[in-house]
Image (cartoon, coloured by chain):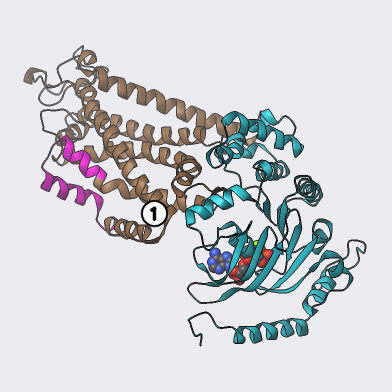
Chain colours: A cyan, B brown
Amino acid sequence: MSGFLEIRGLSARLAGTGQRLLRSVDISLPAGCVRGLVGESGAGKSMIGKAVLGVLPKAVEIIEGEILLDGQDLQKVSPAERRRLIGAKAALIPQDPLTALNPSRRIGPQITDRLVDILGWTKARATTRALEVLAEVSIPEPERIMRLYPHELSGGMRQRILIASAFAAEPKLIVADEPTTALDVTVQKQILKLISELQARHGTALLFVTHDLGVVSKVCDTLSVLYAGKVVEDTTVERFFAAPQHGYSSALLAATPRHTDPSSSLKPVPHEVLETVAAEIAASDAAWRPNGGARG
Amino acid sequence: MLDGRGSIRRRSGARLWLSAVWLTLFVLAALLAPWISPHDPLAQDLMLGRLPPAWVAGAEPGYWLGTDSLGRDVLSRIIHGARIALVVALIAGTATCLLGSALGMVAGFYRGWADRLISRLVDIWMAFPPVLFAILLIAVLGTGLTSVILAIVIIDWTRFCRVVRAETLNQSKMDYVHSAKVAGFTRLRTLATEILPNVLPTIIALLTLEMGIAVIVEAILSFVNLSISTDQPTWGGMIAEGRTSIHQAWWVLVFPLVALFLTVLSFAQFGDGLRERFDPVLR
Ligand SMILES: Nc1ncnc2c1ncn2[C@@H]1O[C@H](COP(=O)(O)OP(=O)(O)OP(=O)(O)O)[C@@H](O)[C@H]1O
Ligand SMILES: [Mg+2]
């Protein structure tokens, strides 16, 4: 069976130095399901999200593998077609609500523009839809809010607006890149709940990037544990929390403070575990040959 | 209210207002010069040479700011001088702004070879001392209003280019640009509707500043006798002539200098004030 989003053997590297950023990543995400991407900083979580949304930095090149969105290989279509495909089927909930809204433009057009210009809706329909989704994320007085500028709203409000905006076009896939990291702890919970609710109600597939395992246990069905651009474990949330298979996963789990036990603190991943993963990755790198190019 | 924002707003309000008043006077003087100037700015009368301003002993009624050594009315010449200053400010300022901002936005947004080319060009340009460059250009192009305007554009576009490029680069890194890309907007559209509104306040402030600078450059060129023909009064030309008789008739030098100073200052202040008005974040 194939998911709405299928990533197969995706490898990417930095164009200049040749440093590997993704190592043969496989990810399958069926329609309506939530997959967490966890791993420490620099593991390549955001890189996968960006690859899916077609916004990889210029310096990063995909060397092999495919990204199938609703059965269509994004690598095989023209850039314009890719942009159209992604714009129509996927959306992003960004991390930082402070910079993700254009400070010089009113909220309304920032939500409706893409409905009108990309999806060809009429202005009236787009406005109705915007009011609808704003109400759905519990924004009071949506008509008034649509006329405001972002700086007139709190961080939590802006994140709600970004969520509304992501769901406005009824995308089949949403990539959320640490959508709560920039928010207060109290607001974080509300926003997480909101994303979960909307995802379930709309049956949207959600790729959830985070390094917080507590969040994963609340929001996700399945998860991929990344280390140095490699998926070291691909499992369901129940299995992961019951008995993680990979040494790195267990260490990551052990390192996470339990919410039930306030005395525990964040512990670093043990050195031996990291050495084992590094050795594994070195072994798989040695076995791997880029098609056509011999690496020293 | 006595909070920080309130008092800042009040101060910038006064600045905007005062500079707007002077600029309005300036524009009106330029437009209505033939009707409002009390005398013919070119009429010479050696009997009336070096008359002091109205409030100094020995003044003649009707010559409010006195006369120069040839007996021409200083006030009328300042009023007529505003015409050239205004034309230069508007045309040279706008053309410089359009050229420099467009290149700056292209360089900052598209990066790559376009950026390398434009940035290198700016570096080379900046290596020339601007006024010397202007004098050289006029020597090649010949004197006249068009040459002066052309010289200002050719010299000053880098001022816009550098600042607008940096600001565009800054804005391009923001998440909202990223989101526009994900949504499927073309690059040109993103540049026009997402980035431009954020760079516009800077461009406006630079534009008004540039208008002031254009007035100064024109005055400098007049001062060294490289601008418009000598029978048309210009502020720079008046300052140059006034310099020779500074000890006998200070007013011939001082009044056009004050007009120049106030105009340039007002342009800059007006731009700053406008930017604060325009920028929704500062507002
Ligand atoms: N624009 C870029 N150019 C070059 N390298 C980059 C760029 N962005 C990220 N990288 C590199 O790619 C790797 C993966 O980065 P990525 O942003 O995916 O990490 P992440 O898992 O999202 O980490 P974090 O939790 O800090 O967000 C890192 O080693 C990073 O240094
Ligand atoms: Mg990241």
- Which residue is more in the foreground, B226 or A71? A71
Identified at 71% across, 41% down, the residue is A157
Which residue is situated farthest in the top direction here? B61
- Which residue is more in the foreground, A263 or A16? A16
Image quadrant where residue B215 sits: top left
Which residue is situated farthest in the left direction here? B46
> Where does the image place residue A19, in percent across and percent down from the top left?
55, 76
| Residue B175 visible in this rendered orientation of the protein | no
- Span of residues in magenta: B127-153
Q: Is residue B228 left or right of residue B202?
A: left
| Residue B139 visible in this rendered orientation of the protein | yes
Q: Looking at the magenta stretch, what is its main secondary structure?
A: helix
Ligand 2 lies in which image quarter? Answer: bottom right
Image quadrant where residue A50 sits: bottom right
Assign a secondary structure to mark 1.
Answer: helix
Q: Is residue B82 above or below residue A89?
A: above
What residue sits right under mark 1 in the picture? B107
